[in-house]
Amino acid sequence: MLEVGTKAPSFELPDQNGEMHRLEDYRGKKVILYFYPKDNTSGCTKQACGFSERYPQFTEKGAVVLGVSKDTVASHKKFEEKYGLAFTLLADPERKVIEAYDVWKEKKNYGKVSMGVVRTTYLIDEEGVIIKANDKVKAADDPEKMLNELS
C-alpha cells in the first residue's frame, strides 16, 4: 500500500464505455480511488452499490469515485448496467495501475495462496496527494466510511 502524504501515481485507463481517464483530469477535486478484486462478486457488488447509492453526496462534497479492477471494459459495462452504477469503473487488465498503487499481493484463501488485488481504498486530495489509505477494507462499510472522511 502506498503511504499517506505521497504523490498518487499518474494513470490513464479506459472506463466502462471505453473513454480514457487520467488522474490529472480530476485536479481540483478529491478522488476516491478504490481497487477491488472482481466485477459481479458479492463483496465487490456491495461496495459498488454502496458508492453508487451515495454518489450524489460524494459529488456534493466535491469528490469523484473511481473503481479499478483487472476486469475488461466489457465486463465493467455489464456490471454497471446490471446494478445501475452511477460512477466510473476503470479497466486495468494489464495491472499497470494496480501494481503502481501496490495492491497486487499474495492472498490466502482457505489455505490456498495466490496473487490478486487486495481491496484497498485511497483518498487523493485536489493536488494529487494521497491523504487516506486503507487496505483493511470491509466492502459493505467502505462507501459510508469514505463519505465520512470527506466531512
Image (tube, rainbow, N blue to C red):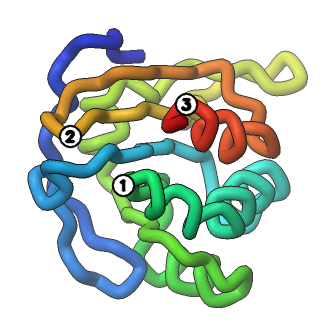
Q: Which mark is residue 94?
A: none
Q: Give the percent coordinates (x, y) of residue 151.
A: 54, 36
- Element assignment for label 3: helix
Residue kind at label 1, given as amino acid type: Gly
Residue with the mark numbered 2: 126
Left or right: 99 in relation to 115: left
Left or right: 128 in relation to 143: left
Of residue 145 and residue 95, the one placed in the foreground of this image is 145
Q: Which mark is residue 62?
A: 1
> Where is 111 relative to 114, above or below?
above
Asked whether residue 70 is in view, the answer is: no
- The mark nearer the N terminus, 2 or 1, is 1
> Where is 94 relative to 96, above or below?
below
> Where is 97 relative to 137, above or below?
below
- The mark nearer the N terminus, 2 or 3, is 2
Q: Are marks 2 and 1 in contact (CB under 8 Å)?
A: yes
Q: Give the percent coordinates (x, y) of residue 144.
A: 71, 43
**Residue extending farthest right:** 110
